[in-house]
Amino acid sequence: MSEKIAVYPGSYDPITNGHVDIIKRGLKIFDKIIVAALENPSKCYLFSLEERLNILKECFKDQPAIEIDFFGGLLVEYLKLKKVGTVVRGLRAISDFEIEFQMALMNRSIEPEFETIFLVPSIKYSFVSSRLVKEVYKLGGEVTAMVPPLVDQKLKEKYAKK
Ligand code: PNS
C-alpha cells in the first residue's frame, strides 16, 4: 500500500506546542507529515526562513515520519511538486474557521483534486498562537509551556538582542 502523506503548511514564526500537537495527531492518520514553512517576501517575520527551518529540524530531528521543507508562492503548486494531495490545518476555535474555510475553498478552486483536513488541537493550546507568544516574550514575559524548549530559548535570545 502506498504511503499516506500530508503537507502541514504554515508560517511557523515560530512553531508552538499547538503546531506540535497537530503534527502528532496528524501522524495518527498519515504515515508522513511534511511540515512546510512559507517564505512570503512581503511578510515581515521575526525569524528568518533559515532560523525557522533550523528550529523545525531540531524539534523533530529524531522523527523520520516528519519532513521539514519550505515553499514560496501558491500552496497548490507546492503540493503538485511534492505529489501530495492532502493539506492538514489546525482549527483552534470558531474564529479560525472562517479564514481556514476560505483558504481551503480557494485552494480547491485553483486545484479541485486537493483536500484539506482540519484537526483540532488539545484544548490547552486552543488559545496559543505564534503572534501572541511573540508578543508575550517581546514584553518580557514567557510562556514556556506553550512552545518547544528551543523556541523558548530562541525567543529570549531574539528579544534580549533588540
Ligand atoms: O501559519 P499561517 O500563517 O496561518 O499559514 C498560512 C498559510 C501558509 C497556510 C497560507 O498563507 C498559505 O497557504 N499561503 C500560500 C499562498 C497561497 O497559496 N495562497 C492562496 C490560497 S489561500
Image (cartoon, grey):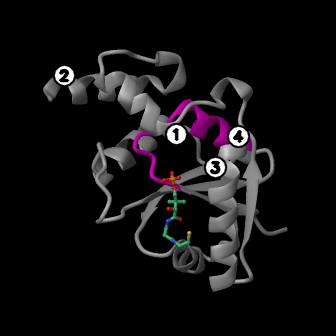
Viewer-nearest of discs 2 and 1: 2
Q: Please name the amino acid that badge 1 sits on.
A: Phe
Does residue 66 sit above or below 2 in this rendering?
above
Viewer-nearest of discs 1 and 4: 4
Q: Is mark 1 within 8 Å of ligand 1?
A: no
Secondary element at image label 4: loop
The disc label shown at residue 93, or none: 4
Mark 2 / mark 4, whichever is N-terminal: 4
Q: Which residue is mark 1?
A: 60
The picture places residue 152, in percent across and down from the top left corner, at: 39, 23
Q: Please name the amino acid that badge 3 sits on.
A: Ala
Q: Residue furthest left?
A: 161
Mark 3 / mark 1, whichever is N-terminal: 1
Task: Kindly indicate whether the residue at mark 1 contacts the one at mark 2 (C-beta within 8 angstroms).
Answer: no
Secondary element at image label 1: loop
Q: What segment is highlighted magenta in the picture?
A: 10-25
Mark 4 / mark 3, whichever is N-terminal: 3
Q: Is mark 3 within 8 Å of ligand 1?
A: no
The disc label shown at residue 160, or none: 2
The residue located at (53%, 17%) in the rendering is 145
Viewer-nearest of discs 2 and 4: 4
Crowdedness near tag 3: few (<14), some (14–19) or many (≥20) residues, C-alpha within 10 Å = few
Q: Is mark 2 within 8 Å of ligand 1?
A: no
Q: Please name the amino acid that badge 2 sits on.
A: Ala
Q: Is residue 146 magenta?
A: no
Mark 2 / mark 1, whichever is N-terminal: 1
Does residue 74 sit above or below 62 in this rendering?
below
Q: Is residue 93 left or right of residue 11?
A: right
Label 3 and label 1: CA atoms lie apart by 9 Å
